[in-house]
Image (cartoon, grey):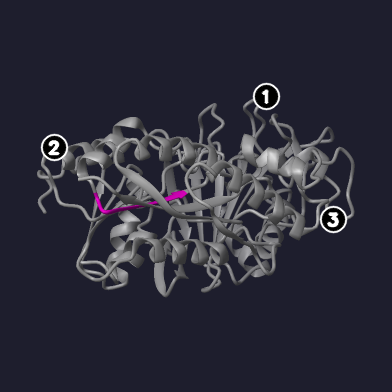
Amino acid sequence: MTTAKYGEKNMGKNTMYQRQKNERQRTAAGSTAAVAEGTKSAGMQKKPKTKTALCPVAGKCGGCRWIERPYGEQLKAKETGFRKLMEPYCKPEPIIGMKQPTHYRNKVHAAFGEDRRHNAISGIYEEKSHRIVPVDSCLIENKKADEIIVSVRGLLKSFKIRPYSEDTGYGLLRHVLIRTGHVTGQIMVVLVLGSPIMPSKNNFVKALLKLHPEITTIVINVNDRNTSMVLGDREQVIYGKGYIEDELCGKIFRISPKSFYQVNPVQTEKLYGKAMEYAGLTGSEVVVDAYCGTGTIGIIAAEKAGKVIGVELNPDAVRDAKSNAKRNEVNNIEFYQNDAGKFLVEMAQQKAKVDVVLMDPPRSGSSEEFLNSVAQLAPKRVVYISCNPETLVRDIKYLTKRGYTVQKGVAVDMFPFTDSCEAVVWMKRTER
């Protein structure tokens, strides 16, 4: 396949990393009407307004809306909500839950600021605001990541570093982002600054490593814009390689500060395992991995496919995807930086042969342009991974009118203690 044939073009500076924008909000607040209905049927209540035994800030944070409910009840509610959404199309398989549903987030973000006495604070934005709720440890976040964030905060005063103030524009440290390899144990620390100049950064690194020698790499990210985006465009590696690696489904994946990578690796293996089961690959198929991110599911699929074509808009993710394929010695996969919808339109226009489409779109779902192109390509199978069952059903409705029927589907609880769930659905082409 040539670059010209399938329209691999540099899309320019990608100013909107849609899949990473406020990912915590995506995880914490991603409810749907049907899941909410399932909540009521299972006896769920709205998020607590007062302190709980498990979390003293649950009422302000809004992240763990279901923290007061037993985990079995949470699963029942999510299963009920998903089943009601899918009733017109199929009877879903039983929901896939977690054995240990705590401290599962391998990506932890903390906002930094000051209290009224100008003491540094760090934590989570209060729901629907930019007021920081101080948090030292969280039920759903990686424990080591929380410890490192507390240590960073403790070092600020001795290095005369003030947190950034959104009101005045003064200060330096805006956010800290920690990414952890579940299997490898590698740890990345990203210091998000309002200015590219960090005083005594080498000594700061030494002090932090003395407290946490397990840290693998430290990166400075510069975000000097007045924006709600966490990460800016400029980066400087000040310790290590600037990325970490982790193992998923037997493959090694490179993770950079901006790369999309599922935050719950334990459940991701179950999710991708179901996706591969639904794909039914036999070794000869041409597979398109749309919205491929760092290439995780495409590289996993390549082991059982004839050829895989991955497409992703985020240039950092595409770079990591190519590196991941090389790292895993996968030679039957190609990655292209492009909008997934436009890419498939070009493939459809050229009457390319595709047997299976794997798609994992953002929360907003797929565009009509993309779905129409899928229908024109007419793959035998479409495997749709979704973080929003509501938009999943909207897109299913579109495809069922264009020759597809839903064969199977299952909800996977990627985000315990929240009202969000992920799902994967297998659709089969019934008309030619």
Chain-order first, disc 1 or disc 3: 3
Chain-order first, disc 2 or disc 3: 3
Question: Alpha-carbon neighbours of circle 3 within 10 Å: few (<14), some, or many (≥20)?
Answer: few
- Is the residue 248 above or below the residue 153 in the image? below
Q: Quadrant of the C terminus?
A: top left
Residue at 70% of width from left, 49% of height from top?
77
Q: In the rendered structure, does residue 337 fall within the stretch colored magenta?
A: no
Please state the horizontal and vertical placement of residue 118, each as a whole percent of the image.
Answer: 79, 36
Q: In the rendered structure, does residue 381 fall within the stretch colored magenta?
A: yes
Chain-order first, disc 1 or disc 2: 1
Residue at 35% of width from left, 39% of height from top?
399
Residue at 34% of width from left, 35% of height from top?
401
Measured Cα–Cα span from mark 2 to mark 3: 55 Å
On the image, numbered disc 2 is attached to which residue?
349
Which one is in front in this view, the residue at disc 2 or the one at disc 3? Answer: 2
Residue 54: numbered disc: 3
Q: Quadrant of the N terminus?
A: bottom left
406 or 97: which is nearer to us?
A: 406
- Amino acid type, mark 2: Gln
Residue 167: numbered disc: 1
- Is the residue 202 above or below the residue 20 in the image? below
- Is the residue 257 above or below the residue 346 in the image? below
Secondary structure mostly seen in magenta is strand
Which one is in front in this view, the residue at disc 1 or the one at disc 2? Answer: 2
Residue 418: numbered disc: none
Residue at 47% of width from left, 41% of height from top?
392
SS assignment at label 3: loop
- Magenta stretch? 379-385
Please state the horizontal and vertical placement of residue 215, each as a whole percent of the image.
Answer: 57, 67
Question: Alpha-carbon neighbours of circle 2 within 10 Å: few (<14), some, or many (≥20)?
Answer: few
In this picture, residue 303 sits left or right of residue 247: left
